[in-house]
Amino acid sequence: MHGLTGIGDEIEESLFQLAAVGANFRKLPGKLSDHLDASFGESFGVLIKELRLLARAVFVVDRGGIIQYIQLVKEVADEPDYDSVLDAVTKLV
């Protein structure tokens, strides 16, 4: 899969998660961390304000910038359903 990109709260976290599912990735221009202002978390409804952490979630966005798939994991300690994520990505490539 080419053109697949991941974004987590930290760059290293994103790269690790993508490598874990065998994905190819590229570096996005601009900000890759939400730590300073939490704007991504607030905008996408995944900010856990009391802990200042992002809920574990996966957003699959098409080339036009439209979100085509969302998976919000109930517990931060749980893993996403990677098979479902990869299915959603595969439908877009």
Image (cartoon, rainbow, N blue to C red):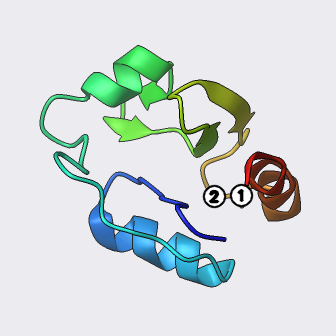
Q: Looking at this view, name the residue that lies furthest to the left.
A: 36
Q: Which mark is residue 77?
A: 2
Would you identify the image quadrant in which residue 11 lies?
Answer: bottom left
Please tell me which residue lies in front, 49 or 27: 27
Q: Would residue 49 be visible to someone looking at this image?
A: no
Whole-percent x, y for residue 13 in the image: 40, 68
**In this rendering, position of residue 17 left or right of residue 28:** right
Which numbered circle lies on residue 78?
Answer: 1
Locate residue 59: give its quadrant: top right
What residue is shown at x 73% (from left), y 34% (from top)?
69
Q: Report the side of 17 relative to 22 (left or right).
A: left
Q: Element type at marker 2?
A: loop
Callout 1: few (<14), some (14-19), or many (20+) C-alpha neighbours within 10 Å?
A: few
Which residue type does callout 2 highlight? Ala
- The location of residue 83, given as percent across then percent down, is 87, 63
- Kindly report the distance in space between the C-alpha atoms of the residues bearing marks 2 and 1: 4 Å
Q: Which image quadrant is residue 50 in?
A: top left
> Which residue is painted at 55% across and 72% down in the image?
18
The x, y position of residue 43, in whole percent, is 39, 16
Camera-nearest residue between 31 and 80: 31
Disc sitting over residue 50 in the figure? none
Q: Marks 2 and 1: CB-CB under 8 Å?
A: yes
The residue closer to the viewer here, 58 or 78, is 58
Give the class, few, some or many, for how many residues have Cα within 10 Å of label 2's Cα (few <14, many ≥20): few
Q: Is residue 36 above or below residue 38?
A: below
Quadrant housing the C terminus? bottom right
Q: Is residue 13 left or right of residue 61?
A: left
Image position of 49 with respect to 24: above or below: above
Q: What residue do we see at 71% from left, 42% from top?
A: 73
Q: Please indicate, yes or no, whether residue 61 appears anywhere in the rendered image.
A: yes
Task: Determine whether the residue tagged by mark 1 lies in a helix, strand or loop.
Answer: loop
Q: Tell me which residue sits at (47%, 71%) in the image.
A: 25
